Image (cartoon, coloured by chain):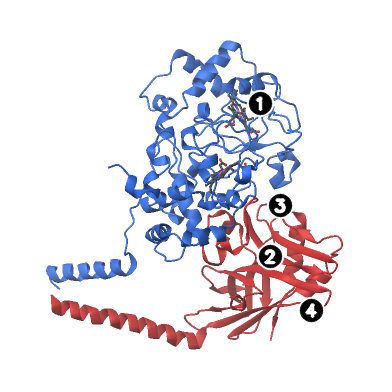
Amino acid sequence: MNKNNIIAFLSVFAFFGSAMYFPYTTTPVKIKYPEYWPKPVYNFEKNPLTQEGIDLGRKLFYDPILSKDSSISCSNCHLSYTAFTHVDHKLSHGINDSIGNRNSPSLMNLAWHNSFMWDGAVSHLDFQALAPISHPAEMGENINNVILKLTKSTDYVKRFYQTFKDSAITGEYLLKAISQFELTLISCNSKYDSVMRKAANFTLQEENGYQLFKKECSSCHTEPFFTNGKFENNGIPLDSVLLDYGRYNITKNPNDSLKFKVPTLRNIEFSHPYMHDGRFKNLSEVLKHYTTKVFPSKTVSKHLGNSISLSSNQKVDLTSFLLTLTDKNFLFNKKNAFPRKFYFPSTEKK
Amino acid sequence: MIGQLKILKWLFIFIFLANYSISIGQKATNDILINISTSVNTNDSLSIDKLKFYLSNFNLLKEGEIVWTEKKSYHLVDISKQKSQSFTFILLKSIEFDEVQFLLGTDSLTNTDGVMGGDLDPTKGMYWAWNSGYINFKLEGTSSPFPFEFHLGGYAPPFQTVQKIKLQTTNRNRLNIGLNITDFLNQIDLTKTHKIMSPGKEAQQLSILLSTLFSISE
């Protein structure tokens, strides 16, 4: 074969191949994160990110179609402008004004989490969305019914087809699409991150706070994610109404009693109220807890056993450091917000 | 150019037909049909509303050595769905075997490796949303006056529930695997144990009991 023949052969082959298998092409996306971060835990090979998949996931995340009475979307409890938590609500609010039993956590850097929920009830990000969809006090819906509703929407059918190249919408695709959007929620542009990249400097106060943080807090709130991903008891006493024993509920192991997943402190300025039941309104209440009110129990961390001692100046310093974890790029990123154009294409301003 | 295209077109059709005929040819010779049956004597006092379970990771062995492994080996058997009770192992060449091994339930990797489709799709009602993991075995019914509900699962130590089943067999093109549910219910004190809905010691014990109740019938 001469060169022309080869080219003709290849192009015909490429045409047949693509026409048969890829009537739509997808645009692969790679997540971006600082090179000094570890590799993600999430296995992207099993769910490769594409722009089409991310867009679909984003539309689903903001769509109340996932709830029984079409009143609640994921974003009702996870608001982009507050690092995807439900601001000012101690316990989450679901359909029919029902109140859940936990505070909604912020959502970010989920590709590096190895368990989900305050008690680690969910072992993989893909499966997480099943929980709120089916929870009677959250979305109160059944995944088969969600799929039935989605199948009636030509826009969804098209988007699922574009993303997964399959004319059926399945539970697998639904959950993978939601994961795709969530995996893009990466917060790595706070002032703290700029300092780490040597592109900015802490003020004296922030620097003092950082040193205190490394001494007193980072054993659990470990950099760069400000969580060690483990379950710990930080000495907040059992709420006598909620009776939430945290990790123990899952493992039934007495050593896990009152342990909760260490939450990230990134964007902590915006994710109040704090703790699994939202018992503290602001950071000064949190510091008051760590310095004077650590409740002794069998499982409380040794590190906190007798409360931490901090002077009032030190508290101010520590707080000013915590505020350097605010990432405005993340909070106000349009790519994370309500995708108006996916719902109302004609109103989109060019 | 046009001439080349024509030849190419025929080439494609030829390859397509060749593949097709090869696959038809094989079906007749080496494949093994697997039938799963569950025996239970329902009567006035015993009724079964739901019986669904996973069988996975099928291997065929000869003198203790694995000679064939099913790829993507997950089967959700559901007594209300005739089709789910039989499946075929497609073998490229004929093999000798004297034992079949499989898991009742799904292994821990399946439980932690992200969402999958087919029989493992979470729409099949065999996934626990609030304590992540697959339900390996679901049995619901009434042994009057007691309604019972057994949802057995859990992959995390120390309460793993998945069970390895090993059955001797003589080489044939058909395997009839039976699970004796009557024996299962007879060996449980339904007055004490009639509802298990989460991982734990009881789920583990009942899974072990189930693993002894499989057999191969002629």
Query: Residue drawn at (46%, 23%), measured in percent from left and top?
Result: A324
The amino acid sitting under disc 2 is Phe
- State if disc 3 and disc 2 touch (CB < 8 Å): no
Under mark 1, the amino acid is: His
Which comes sooner in the sequence, label 2 or label 3? 2
At label 4, the amino acid type is: Asn
Let me know if marks 2 and 3 both belong to one chain.
yes
- Mark 3: few, some, or many residues within 10 Å (few <14, many ≥20)? few
Measured in 3D between alpha carbons, the distance from the residue under mark 3 to the one under mark 4, in whole angstroms, is: 34 Å
Residue A332 position within the rendered picture, expressed as x and y whole percent measured from the top left? 41, 33
Disc 1 to disc 4, how far (Cα)? 60 Å
**Distance of label 2 from label 1 (alpha carbons):** 43 Å
Residue tagged by mark 4? Answer: B41
- What kind of element bears circle 4? loop
Viewer-side residue, B90 vs B101:
B90
| Secondary element type, mark 3 | loop
Image: A309 above or below B113: above
Of labels 3 and 4, earlier in sequence is 4
- Residue at 56% x, 82% y: name it: B32
Picture quarter with the N terminus of chain A? bottom left
At 61% across and 40% down in the image, what residue appears? A93
Quarter of the figure that contains the C terminus of chain A: top left
Label 2 residue SS:
strand
